[in-house]
Structure formats: C-alpha cells, structure tokens
Image (cartoon, grey):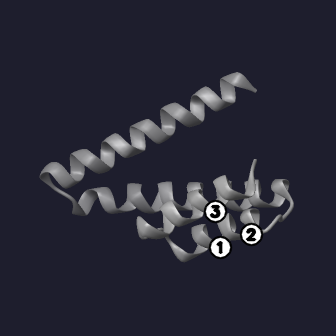
C-alpha cells in the first residue's frame, strides 16, 4: 500500500479519536513495520475492544445500546466473512 494512503488512514483514525494503542499499531505500519506483527496487534486490539464493548452493554440504554449492538453485529459479520474467505 502506498505511504500516502497509510498516512491518510492514520490521520482519519487520529481525527476520529482512536485509542492510542490502535494509533500506535497504525503508525508502526505506516512507518514500515512487519505487516504480520501489525496484523497481530490489530487483531488483538479488535478482540479486546469487542470484549470491552460487550461488557459495557449492560450499562447502556436506548439509542446508545442499539448503536453499540449494531457495531458488534457488523464486526462479527465481517469477522465471519473473513473466516469463510480464508
């Protein structure tokens, strides 16, 4: 992937207020880190974030709960599609 695209992705995550650990993984990738290591870091971050979101569901109500459930559903659907493609 071209360096300018990597930078734009990093900047988009930055503006969205991404978690510092996630930003660090993307920054390492942007700077040329081994892609397998970056993939492992991102996968670990995603799994941890998913568990965190699921733990917080019981504290949410209304539209906040619905939005979180929808993001979890989209994540799990995408993860399943990835497994089936492999």
> Which tag is nearer the camera, tag 2 or tag 3?
3
81 and 4: which is toward the camera: 4
Picture layout, residue 45 above or below residue 84: below
Q: Earlier in the sequence, mark 3 or mark 1?
A: 3
Badge count: 3
Task: State the residue position of label 1.
Answer: 24
47 and 7: which is toward the camera: 7
76 and 26: which is toward the camera: 26
Q: Image quarter for residue 28?
A: bottom right
Q: Residues within 10 Å of mark 2 (few under 14, many from 20)?
A: some
Kindly state the secondary structure of the residue where label 3 is placed: helix
Percent across and percent down for residue 76 are 50, 37
> What's the distance in space between the residues labelled 1 and 2, CA to CA?
6 Å
Q: Mark 2 and mark 1 in contact (Cβ < 8 Å)?
A: yes
> What's the distance in space between the residues labelled 2 and 3, CA to CA?
11 Å
Kindly state the secondary structure of the residue where label 1 is placed: helix
Kindly state the secondary structure of the residue where label 2 is placed: helix
Q: Looking at the image, which residue sits at the far left?
A: 62
Q: Residues within 10 Å of mark 3 (few under 14, many from 20)?
A: some
Q: Is residue 13 left or right of residue 55?
A: right
On residue 81, which mark appears?
A: none
Q: Image quarter for residue 23?
A: bottom right
Q: Residue at x 41, y 44 (%)?
A: 72
Q: Mark 1 and mark 3 in contact (Cβ < 8 Å)?
A: no
Task: State the residue position of label 3.
Answer: 7
Q: Image quarter for residue 83?
A: top right
Q: Quadrant of the C terminus?
A: top right
Q: Is residue 49 left or right of residue 71?
A: right
Percent across and percent down for residue 55 are 38, 61
Task: State the residue position of label 2.
Answer: 28
Picture layout, residue 41 above or below residue 79: below
Q: Residue at x 43, y 68 (%)?
A: 15
């Amino acid at each position: 992937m071209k360096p300018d695209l990597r930078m734009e992705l990093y900047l988009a995550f930055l503006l969205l207020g991404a978690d510092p650990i996630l930003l660090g993984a993307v920054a390492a990738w942007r700077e040329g880190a081994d892609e397998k290591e970056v993939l492992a870091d991102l996968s670990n971050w995603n799994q941890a974030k998913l568990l965190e979101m699921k733990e917080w569901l019981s504290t949410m109500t209304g539209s906040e709960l619905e939005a979180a459930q929808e993001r979890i559903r989209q994540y799990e659907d995408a993860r399943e599609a990835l497994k089936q493609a492999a």
